Image: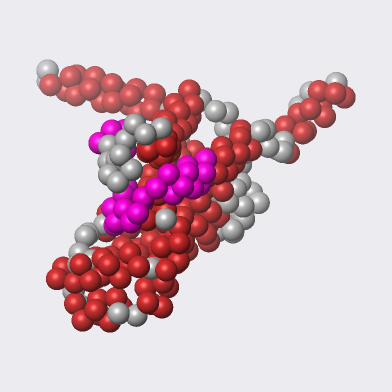
Amino acid sequence: HVTRPRRRRRRRRRLRRVRRLRGLRLISAQAAVWLRRFALEAVLAPAYLAAGLCKIRYDGLADQFKGEWISHYLAAKRHESLAPSLNRRIAAAPALCALFSLGNLTVEVALPLASILAARSRLAPRLRRAAAVAWVGFHVSIFGLLGPNFIRFAMLAIFAADPTADSKPNGDAKPADARTHGDFARALAATALLSAWFAVQLRSDVARLTKSFPLNQRMEPYLPVPEMSMYTRLTNPNEDQYMLSLCAVLAVVAAIAREFSERLRPGPKTREETDEETRASSGKTP
């Protein structure tokens, strides 16, 4: 008889807790969207861009069209390849090496930059999925021909692409809620990480041009993010090469900064906001 009142009190407490939780918004659609955008625009895209910029910095832009670095690493890594004979055949074909190098330039420079700059366009979902397919194929080919396993990047690319989402615009979608302090904190975290990627790239070029770091050595910092200088040969590095790299980094930073400044501008008013202003101007109340 003593335990029954205790059970009732516990049940009432549970019911009160459930009623309190019903009034809370436990699921935030904006936070879910932010997580995918963070993975794409603050992790994946700048990492690929950093790798592409390092190849231009250390090997020059001309080598990216010739593909000599592809031939070099295919021959050097043939013992780690799943098909060594395929490595030899590709390395012996300059046209194939040039084609592979152009594909690498597309994967590491063009697609990441387009994924950030075209994030507001109608083609953004298709572009994200195309980039994810290209990145997954890119890492699978690296694993098969050269040995390193970057499949973790492939999984992150699939997550950021959101392949199960509907790419058609939803006309009945509700307007976004007002921004919260959490939204601003998430934005600051993403901006800080994105800035760190390009700060490392700028520091690498400026250090060489100011002669505070040797031209013929890689600068691979541990913090805040790596430089991503893998698969670079440092073929005849000179100041002109680092100046070209610096200009490329500044151009990318300027393009991304302009895109983000456009996002901060207030968008078109929703129908509810327009109706509210109309009622206020006419003196009517809803």
Task: Decide which of 90, 81 is in the foreground and name it.
Answer: 90
- Counting from the top left corner in percent of width and height, residue 14 is at 28, 26
Image quadrant where one finds the N terminus: top left
Task: Decide which of 206, 19 is in the foreground and name it.
Answer: 206
Determine if the magenta segment contains residue 96. Answer: no
Measuring 42% from the left and 73% from the top, which residue is drawn there?
99
Determine if the magenta segment contains residue 235. Answer: yes
In this rendering, the answer to whether 64 lies above or below 79 is above
- Counting from the top left corner in percent of width and height, residue 142 is at 28, 65
Q: Is residue 268 visible?
A: yes
Left or right: residue 72 compared with residue 64: left
Task: Decide which of 11, 56 is in the foreground and name it.
Answer: 56
In this rendering, the answer to whether 6 lies above or below 258 is above
Measuring 67% from the left and 33% from the top, which residue is drawn there?
266
Image quadrant where one finds the C terminus: top right
Magenta stretch: give its range: 222-250
Q: Is residue 164 visible?
A: no
